[in-house]
Amino acid sequence: MRSAPTILHLDMDAFFASAEQASKPSLRGKAVVVGGLGPRGVVATASYEARVFGVHSAMPMAQARRLAPNAAYLVPRFGFYRSISEQVMGLLRALSPLVEPLSLDEAFVDLEAGGAAWDEESARLAAVKLRTDIRAVTGLTGSVGLAASKMLAKIASEQAKPDGLVVIDPGSERAMLGPMSVRTLPGVGPATGDHLRRAGITTVEEIVEAGEDELVRLLGKAHGHGLYAMALAHDERPVVAERETKSVSVEDTYDVDIHDRVRVGLEVQRLADRCVRRLREAGLSGRTIVLKVRRYDFSTLTRSETLRGPTDDQAVVREAAARLLEAVDTTGGVRLLGVGVSGLADYTQEDLFAQAAEERAEVDAGVVEEGEDRSVEVREEPAERRWVAGHDVRHEEFGHGWVQGSGLGRVTVRFETPDSGPGRVRTFRVEDPALSVAEPLPLVSGGLAGV
Ligand code: DCP
Ligand code: MG
């Protein structure tokens, strides 16, 4: 495991609800619940003000209404959240080529891969700047965890909520994890949690005390080994970019696992040479050398090293790849090796980034669908009811607003914009020709245009 807290986990605070509060000044500081409003709708998220009443994600909407009858109830606007998410992910990608989004509002970043940080102080500075930039560009707050592994970075960002930064000092992990619930560990859901509890294991330190053999006996080989390692704070999972659009890489899968260390070294050199050839053919050079190793048991590691400047020099890439290999345990054999160069630089850079942005848009669209699946039932509004609670409208005379509610042939609109004060409410007939559906406005003036 690395020795500095350079893996960053970002999680935006009450994401959908905060976006709605930023968009609607009259809701700031108020209980806001976003979710499906149909009979089987569930809560997507609730503002921190609404959580005080016990409202939380995945709760049936009817229950939320009983707990917080005076909250504002809004239907999610995924396109709007996606545009904010793209801004946030853009800021993360400026920090490192290794950004692993987990959902619209959550991602891991390997700060070392981008050269953005190499020790605790530089990591802390990068995180503070990131939080400031997110606020400036989106108007929203996000919480950040920094640690030497993904598991701990995620635990740290949870502790940092809301609107905070928590750094877990390497060395302090085990003491911190010990008293925590086993459910804190990745891969421990309700079923595994119950199973462990029946065996008398409820905390992380009880896993350690039980020992690896007992864990394997309880949970089977793969899960038992994995969980025992996590309990000892050993988490080597790499940050994996969802697509290496900003890198040139080559890899080979071997029919028979390679055991001979010398042979592994030669293969890595060969891959480095091939990678450099590709790089040159594309007229590119890059700053970050990435080595990928899949071992006999399918565990996959990526290691990276960032140089001071971009290179397309065969000897430099070979050397860096060989150095990265030194730190990888290959006993047991390897089934796949790869060498890549990222952090690309050149006159073609802009084109590449434009292309990368397009591809990202597709990927993000995929992420949204997942988010939708997670819980929210999006109703098709009947034609005469296109006034969806929370969605934006425009009135010829009164300007931009949002639907506060509708029924009995009437629609109530509050006229306000992200940079106005709280606005006034007016009621119209649902068929009023002066009223039309509108696109969301940027939360920060000029914000949607320029990341
Ligand atoms: N979401 C959803 N259904 C769920 C959980 C979440 O639709 N069951 C959506 C709404 C959230 C967003 O995903 O705003 C991000 O999920 P988080 O779990 O990060 O929750 P929040 O960002 O809302 O709150 P927190 O401050 O706890 O991160
Ligand atoms: Mg969140």
Image (cartoon, helix red, strand yellow):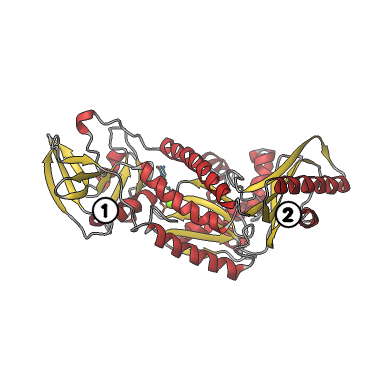
Q: Quadrant of the N terminus?
A: bottom right
Residue plotted at (81% across, 56% down): 315
Residue 258 appears at what percent x and percent y? 83, 40
Which element type, helix, strand or loop, lies under badge 1? loop
Find the distance from the CA under tag 2 to the CA under tag 1.
Answer: 50 Å
Number of the label disc, if any, that sits on residue 24: 1
Q: Is residue 257 left or right of residue 351?
A: right
Residue 168 appears at what percent x and percent y? 57, 64
**Amino acid bearing label 1:** Lys
Q: Nearer the viewer, mark 2 or mark 1?
A: 2
Residue plotted at (60% across, 68% down): 120
Q: Are marks 2 and 1 in contact (CB under 8 Å)?
A: no
Asked whether 209 or 293 is in front, the reply is 293
**Amino acid bearing label 2:** Asp
Q: Is residue 173 left or right of residue 25?
A: right
The earlier-in-sequence mark between 2 and 1 is 1
Q: Quadrant of the C terminus?
A: bottom left
Q: Which residue is mark 2?
A: 312
Q: Is residue 212 visible?
A: no
Q: Residue furthest bottom?
A: 121
Residue plotted at (26% across, 53% down): 24
Asked whether 403 or 297 is in front, the reply is 403
